């Protein structure tokens, strides 16, 4: 019996005869030899079929094989120092499994809309493979980090009656005879979790009915939201930078093959593991932008746009925390500044290379009366938030938390241009297919 292996395990089977289930991504052949480009979801490598070494039937199967046809290949693994993967298979047998006629994504260039319409197939391509593998590593490392740091995962509901991040971006749905919304953020529930279990995190899908059509916005995205009791904002920033550094280091350590496919420079990534990350206040950020001469219209009190965020992070060539934004442009739950009533205790982490905000976080307000007033001022119904205010009525403690946008982090770490690449089936302003 032949051993069936995955391409990624080739290194453990050099000079052995094995069997591999694979798809054909591409092919080159002459009268005497055929080169089959193979993938099996673990890696990509080449099968070499030499006419004089195989039966006529096997050589015909190789010559006639079509793009994305599925096959079993039988052969001997060899080292192949010329390829980045390092191994190939010298094919002795081929068994056809599934036909593939006129695969729509050919090696020629295709437009983005065409590719997005074929996302279910496009995911098979090499770059997409590499990004999805890195996504998986970032998810794996997230669980490792928070478990190691003593957090427990508390799952927040997806169907909610609350609007943590403002009312304009809510996805409305009926909940039997009541109204409900798809979760914008699990934060409020994580605050309850932190009061119950100390250090908690959620990791789930979140929804924003944002009419933004940019390379940074998804309608449905995944967020990691840690929340920590007995913790002020300064310590929360330390957790955040340690977490980001850990994610980048994990990708460097475990995804060298994928980073190579993406041509992502590891030396650039290494810089992002060096702590601490710089911290500046919103006030200083406005001043920096004004002094640069590039942003004559920037005024104190306004949120930054992409060009401003890009400038700030490039200025430090590392992720940078921008702290204490104006109260008027931030959500209701943020803790007021002790000596200034125009700013709140919060920070956004801006990624370099033009990727913008990857984390938003803050210390949370603890005064019930203040929160009730804030909730009303935000146009929300305070009856819906009594459970949230209860957290301040019964053993309230200083607490802080943050949210990392998973796909923003992936786009940045992989160096992709558009956030649609960072999620298997992106939901965009004009797209819910496939
Ligand atoms: O800054 P945001 O809106 O913060 C919150 O939701 C807080 N409740 C988090 C917390 O403190 N627990 O979102 C957090 C992060 C952003 O920094 C960004 O990375 C990502 O979520 N994000 C988006 N990612 C993709 N598409 C969108 N439309 C996004 N909106 C926010
Ligand atoms: Mg934000």
Image (tube, rainbow, N blue to C red):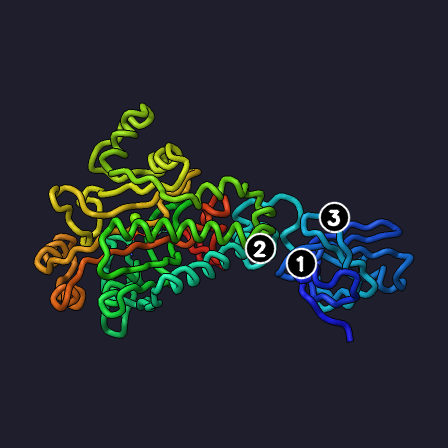
Residue closest to the eye, 48 or 158: 48
Q: Give the residue at x 14% y 41%.
A: 342
- Front label number (3 vs 2): 3
Nearer the observer, 182 or 147:
147
Which is more toward the observer, 292 or 426?
292
**Residues packed near mark 1 inside 10 Å, few (<14), some (14 to 19) or many (20 plus):** many
Label 1 CB sits under 8 Å from any ligand 1 atom: no
Would you say residue 105 is visible in this rendering?
yes
Q: Position of residue 249 (x, y in %)?
A: 48, 50
Which residue is the site of mark 2? 129
The residue that appears at 13% across and 54% down in the rendered structure is 374
Q: Give SS at disc 3.
A: loop
Comes first in the chain, label 3 or label 2: 3
Which quadrant of the structure image shows residue 40?
bottom right
> What residue sits 36% from the left and 58% below the top?
224
Q: Is residue 367 left or right of residue 400?
A: left
Which residue in the structure is indicated by mark 3? 81
Label 2 packing within 10 angstroms: few (<14), some (14-19), many (20+): many
Find residue 50 and report its image quarter: bottom right
Earlier residue among tags 1 and 3: 1
Measuring from the top left, give residue 101's x and y in whole percent: 70, 59
Question: Circle 1 is placed at which residue position?
Answer: 39
Tell me residue 196's x, y (percent).
24, 70
Question: Callout 2: helix, strand or loop?
Answer: helix
- Please count the marks in the image: 3
Q: Is residue 280 left or right of residue 14?
A: left
Distance CA(mark 1)–CA(mark 2): 10 Å
293 lies above or below 87: above
Quick one: quadrant of the N terminus? bottom right
Q: Is residue 117 at least partly visible in the picture?
A: no
Q: Which mark is residue 110?
A: none
């Amino acid at each position: 019996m032949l051993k069936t292996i995955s391409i990624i395990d080739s290194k453990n089977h050099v000079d052995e005869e094995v069997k591999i289930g694979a798809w054909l991504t591409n092919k080159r052949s002459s009268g005497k030899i055929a080169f089959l480009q193979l993938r099996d979801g673990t890696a990509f490598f080449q099968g070499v079929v030499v006419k004089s070494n195989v039966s006529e039937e096997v050589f015909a199967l190789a010559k006639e094989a079509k793009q994305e046809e599925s096959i079993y290949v039988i052969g001997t693994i060899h080292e192949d120092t010329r390829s980045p993967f390092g191994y190939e298979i010298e094919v002795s047998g081929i068994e056809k499994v599934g036909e593939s006629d006129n695969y729509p994504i050919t090696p020629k260039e295709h437009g983005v809309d065409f590719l997005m319409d074929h996302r279910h197939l496009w995911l098979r391509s090499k770059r997409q493979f590499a990004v999805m593998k890195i996504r998986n590593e970032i998810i794996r490392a997230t669980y490792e980090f928070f478990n190691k740091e003593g957090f427990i995962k508390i799952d927040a509901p997806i169907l909610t009656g609350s609007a943590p991040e403002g009312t304009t971006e809510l996805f409305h749905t009926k909940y039997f005879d009541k109204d409900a919304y798809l979760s914008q953020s699990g934060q409020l529930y994580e605050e309850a979790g932190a009061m119950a279990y100390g250090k908690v995190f959620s990791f789930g899908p979140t929804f924003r009915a944002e009419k933004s059509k940019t390379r940074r916005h998804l309608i449905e995205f995944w967020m990691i939201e840690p929340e920590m009791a007995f913790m002020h904002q300064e310590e929360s920033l330390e957790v955040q930078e340690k977490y980001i550094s850990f994610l980048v280091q994990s990708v460097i350590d475990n995804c060298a093959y994928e980073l190579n496919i993406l041509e992502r420079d590891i030396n650039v990534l290494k810089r992002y593991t060096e702590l601490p990350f710089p911290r500046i206040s919103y006030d200083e950020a406005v001043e920096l932008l004004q002094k640069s001469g590039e942003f004559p219209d920037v005024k104190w009190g306004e949120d930054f746009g992409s060009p401003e965020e890009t400038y700030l992070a490039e200025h430090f060539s590392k992720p940078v925390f921008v702290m204490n934004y104006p109260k008027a442009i931030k959500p209701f739950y943020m803790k007021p500044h002790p000596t200034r009533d125009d700013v709140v205790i919060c920070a956004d982490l801006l990624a370099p290379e033009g990727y913008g905000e990857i984390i938003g976080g803050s210390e949370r307000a603890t005064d019930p009366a203040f929160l009730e007033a804030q909730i009303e001022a935000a146009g929300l119904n305070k009856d819906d938030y009594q459970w949230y205010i209860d957290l301040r009525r019964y053993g309230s403690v200083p607490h802080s938390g943050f949210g990392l946008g998973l796909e923003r982090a992936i786009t940045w770490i992989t160096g992709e241009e558009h956030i649609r690449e960072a999620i298997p089936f992106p939901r965009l302003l004009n797209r819910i297919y496939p």
